[in-house]
Image: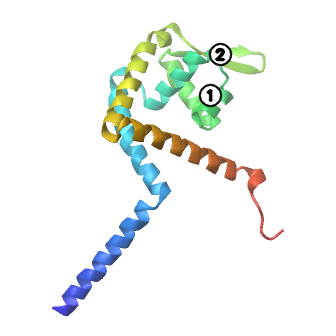
Amino acid sequence: MINDTTAREEKSQKSESRRHFLEDCLFFSVNAISRQLLKLAEAEFASLKLSPAHASLMLILYDNPGINPKKLGEFLQLSPSTITRFIDALARKKLVRRKNCGKNIAIFPTQKGLEMKPAIAQAYKAFYLAYTRMLGDGYAHRLALQIHQAGQRLAGASAPENFHDPDL
């Protein structure tokens, strides 16, 4: 009887230590909430046949017609190859067009892309309302701000000039 009790207690402690590790792990927590938010966002954008990421790119284009792919990547914090794939996908749907400007490329929404602006804005609003209903408006705003600030700090800390070689 004592051995069974001891085994259960040890198992419970191991389970508890795993739970605590995951609760305190920013990487795990951010990825877990990202997956949950992605499900909500995909549900809101499904009727538009756009991914939430493609819709985000379209919103940036509406406010910045003629933006270059490099600047789009900075806004969305995505690599140049990912931005190229996004632009290619949206161009196939005839939602964006490229314009060569000397050595640079400018990206513009097409007329069809512009016509989607109200629907994209509505889907984003519905997405925002869905998660703020679950989290509370103030908490959702504070959490988004804290995650954004943490991302900026991590990006600054991982910049090459901020690396320090202890062997030097």
Relative to 144, say whether 83 is above or below: above
**Helix, strand or loop for disc 2:** loop
Q: Is residue 63 left or right of residue 33?
A: right
Q: Which residue is mark 1?
A: 72
Q: Residue at x 34, y 76 (%)?
A: 14
**Where does the N terminus fall, quadrant-wise?**
bottom left
Q: Residue furthest bottom?
A: 2
Residue 102 coordinates in the image, percent (x, y) = 78, 16
Q: Residue at x 38, y 40 (%)?
A: 37
- Please say whether residue 149 is visible from this viewpoint: yes
Mark 2, residues whose alpha carbon is within 10 Å: few (<14), some, or many (≥20)? some
The quarter holding residue 4 reads bottom left
Q: Residue at x 40, y 50 (%)?
A: 32
Do the CB atoms of the residues marked 1 and 2 lie less than 8 Å apart? no
Question: Amino acid under label 1?
Answer: Leu
Report the number of discs: 2
Q: CA distance from mark 1 to mark 2?
A: 10 Å
Residue 128 coordinates in the image, percent (x, y) = 39, 30
Q: Which residue is mark 2?
A: 66
Q: Nearer the viewer, residue 153 or 118?
A: 153
Mark 1, residues whose alpha carbon is within 10 Å: few (<14), some, or many (≥20)? many
Q: Earlier in the sequence, mark 1 or mark 2?
A: 2
- Please say whether residue 49 is visible from this viewpoint: no
Relative to 132, say whether 152 is above or below: below
**Where does the C terminus fall, quadrant-wise?**
bottom right
Question: Amino acid under label 2?
Answer: Gly
Q: Residue at x 38, y 69 (%)?
A: 18
